[in-house]
Image (cartoon, grey):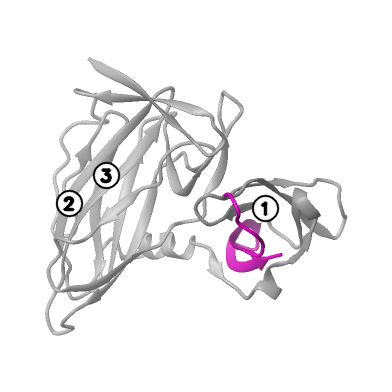
Amino acid sequence: MARDEQLTGRSGRRRRWAWAIAGLALGGPAAADPFATEWARSAKSEARLVAAGATLAGFEIALAPGAITYWRDPGDAGAAPAFDFSGSDNLARAEVAFPAPKRIREADGGDAFGYDAGVTFPIKVEPRDPARPVTLAMKVNYAVCEKLCLPARADLALALPTAATPYSAPVQAALASAPRPVAPEAFGVLTSEGAAGWRLCAPRGPGAARDLFVEPPPGWWVVAAALPGESAERDCFAISLREKPKDAALPVALRLTMTGGSGPIETSVSAQ
């Protein structure tokens, strides 16, 4: 049995959630190894923590066919993953890296920002005492959506080893897929379009087609869309300002992420 509820996104679009009492696991029993926890299973996903070395770990989500999960900005509706490391031992700081997202068109016309083939979130670890190992304990709440959106939770703990592990290479690959920070001037040219928002253009280069993701402060809502055919030499995007807090004024700080091209990049700008 399940009780249906709904979640409203920034666009006012509502997603139906099923708070499942019982669900289907993705597979049969999976034995843990010294460098990975057992899988924490939910109806449409399973997740585990893997160790990649003394200062690097990975939170891995495997998805059922047709399911998606979300980036740090979920898009029109959804929920970003939330990480809690407060139960860890000898941990000074844990920093979660987010691999570059993709824009996932949904049946109701909205756009989700996230992953549709599973994902590993690298976790960069700083020990409080470098002479002692870290035990990384984490509680993660994340969302998995197909026709219904299902909340998922994983409570995981793992002692990190002092050397590299069989998971070092895949976690490093996931880390390399996160956007690379660049200076604003290396990202592209942002120009004001008045009350409508802004336009961003970046020189076109080799590689996959580019996409742009814009993260504004809380209370602001902006939407980025490609402007195909705008230029043969540049990739251009319209950044539309849909909502802002009452009495808020420009400039506004925007975090920009661009995928495709020669690799994902990100920067922060003050948009006038």
**Relative to 8, does residue 183 appear above or below in the rendering?**
below
Residue pointed to by mark 2: 156
Query: Which disc, if any, is residue 23?
Result: none
Q: Amino acid at mark 1?
A: Ala
Examine the rendering and report whether any part of residue 203 can be seen.
Answer: no
Label 3 vs 1, first from the N-terminus: 3
Q: Residues within 10 Å of mark 3 (few under 14, many from 20)?
A: many
- Secondary structure of the residue carrying tag 2 is strand
Residue pointed to by mark 3: 47
Residue pointed to by mark 1: 208
Report if the CB atoms under discs 2 and 3 are less than 8 Å apart: yes
Looking at this view, is 210 or 163 the one in front?
Answer: 210
Quadrant where the C terminus is found in the figure: bottom right
Q: CA distance from mark 3 to mark 1?
A: 29 Å
Q: CA distance from mark 2 to mark 3?
A: 9 Å
Q: Residues within 10 Å of mark 1 (few under 14, many from 20)?
A: few
Looking at this view, is 253 or 24 the one in front?
Answer: 253
- The stretch drawn in magenta includes residue 260: yes
**Relative to 117, does residue 245 appear above or below in the rendering?**
below
Report if the CB atoms under discs 3 and 1 are less than 8 Å apart: no
**Relative to 197, does residue 204 appear above or below in the rendering?**
below
